[in-house]
Image: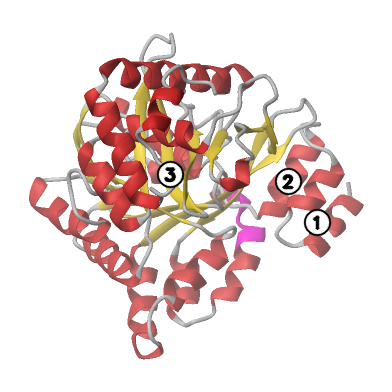
Amino acid sequence: MTLSFTRDLSFILPDTLQGIQRYERIYAALQKNRSWYDECYKELQRLFFKMTELGASDMDIGGKRANDQVWFRVKGNKYPCDELPHYTNDETASLLISAINAEQKNALFLQKNIDVAISIDIGAEQPSRFRSDIFFEQSSLAANFRMINQKLFDLKDLRIPPPIHERLDLEYEKTGLILITGITGSGKSSTLDSIIDMNNRKNKGSMIIIGNPIEYIHQSKKCLISHREIGTDVLSFQKGTIEALRQDPDIVVVGEMRDPSTISTVLEVTDSGHKVFSTLHTSSAVESIHRIIAEFPPDEQVRVRFRLADTLKVVISQKLVPSRSGGLTLAKEILSVGPSEQAAIRNGNVNELFQMLTEGRRRGMCTMQQDLLSLVKRGVITKETALNYANNRKVMKQLLGTY
């Protein structure tokens, strides 16, 4: 037992009381006993402090899967932490339930899963924020916490080429769809927040960010920035995007294009003369276009292709790959859409884009393999890492063979 009140809690939790009823009783007990609630907060502080101390990107706790231990992902590897105590199922439930409000608790018990952002003071200049996914696993409460990077990168640090930098900047292009894509944990949010910050510092305008959850909170500088969180401020990405049109935006940021209705709405908003940023869970620029089109029935795909060709401006597909120094570094593929690329999308010849990517360096474009080769040449990553993270291993071998 780790929490001081665990024994007292066991007296009101008979073994016959299981599932949501058990967790409802834990919630009621925490509301009644403020000292228990405060102890849970301090225990979470300790866990999150350890997470930052280790430089972990993720922390997992709870469920039968965890064996009562706390697990961290550090530099890509996930492992249990032997330096921290073990937590019983009821202790884990107490920690997680203490971190959410009544509305979030009801949503969790109804939907068996919630995404929330948690702010907690762990001794930094400002409260640290963590993206939290709380869910049920084998009838037990469990959670994954991801560190929200509080450091905003300069786009030069991300090696965004000047021609692409301009296309991301409201000063140079007032309209169009920009996609940041990559698998979970590829740093999409950090890249997107850096782009938002660049526009916030440079351009006078209005920006609306719709997220699930809202991760980084941007303070309005030159831009008036509104943050709208799904479930708290707005019902869905689609509704938030539609409502944004009535809120005088110059830029709309849609956290994720998850379904056909959201994609259609994003294309509409972009088509109406706004600059829109969004994300997809895809690992290449060509795959991103295929994914968007494939979300729609065959009889709608021609219309979607034409609208996408007219609105899409830039796709940045990225990965975080192990560096020689032991950390992670950004590798990316960049597509910049001009007349030739528009024609390829409009005519259904999306696969031609790969050749355009390969030959488009002057316009800031590159394939994932070309960017990985650049990292090898600079001594940032090994040849083996380049091969392991390439989208096309055969092409990567050819490029490495000429180096």
Q: What element carries label 2?
A: helix
Query: Is 45 one of the magenta-colored residues?
Result: no
Q: Is residue 342 or residue 270 the one in the foreground?
A: 270
Q: Nearer the viewer, mark 3 or mark 1?
A: 3
Q: Residue 133 carries which label?
A: 3
Q: Residue placed at 46% from the left, 61% from the top?
A: 337
- Disc 1 and disc 2: Cα gap in Å? 8 Å
Q: Residue placed at 55% from the left, 37% from the top?
A: 60
Residue 67 picture location, percent across and down: 64, 39
For the residue carrying disc 2, how many other residues have a C-alpha within 10 Å: few (<14), some (14-19), or many (20+)?
A: many
Give above or below for 224 relative to 352: above
Q: What element carries label 3?
A: strand
Q: Mark 1 points at which residue?
A: 396
Q: What element carries label 1?
A: helix
Q: Disc 2 or 3, which lies upstream in sequence?
A: 3
For the residue carrying disc 1, how many other residues have a C-alpha within 10 Å: few (<14), some (14-19), or many (20+)?
A: many
Give above or below for 268 relative to 243: below
Label 1–label 2 contact, CB within 8 A: yes
- Disc 2 and disc 3: Cα gap in Å? 32 Å
Give the residue furthest to the left.
246
Q: Is residue 45 or residue 400 the one in the foreground?
A: 45
Residue 260 picture location, percent across and down: 33, 71
Main SS, magenta residues: helix
Q: Disc 1 or 2, which lies upstream in sequence?
A: 2
Q: Which amino acid, by three-letter code, is at mark 1?
A: Met
In the rendered view, does 269 fall on the left or right side of 69? left
Snapshot quadrant of residue 93: top left
Q: Which amino acid, by three-letter code, is at mark 2?
A: Leu
In the image, the segment drawn in magenta is 357-362
Q: Is residue 209 visible in this depiction of the protein?
A: no
For the residue carrying disc 3, how many other residues have a C-alpha within 10 Å: few (<14), some (14-19), or many (20+)?
A: some
- Disc 3 and disc 1: Cα gap in Å? 36 Å
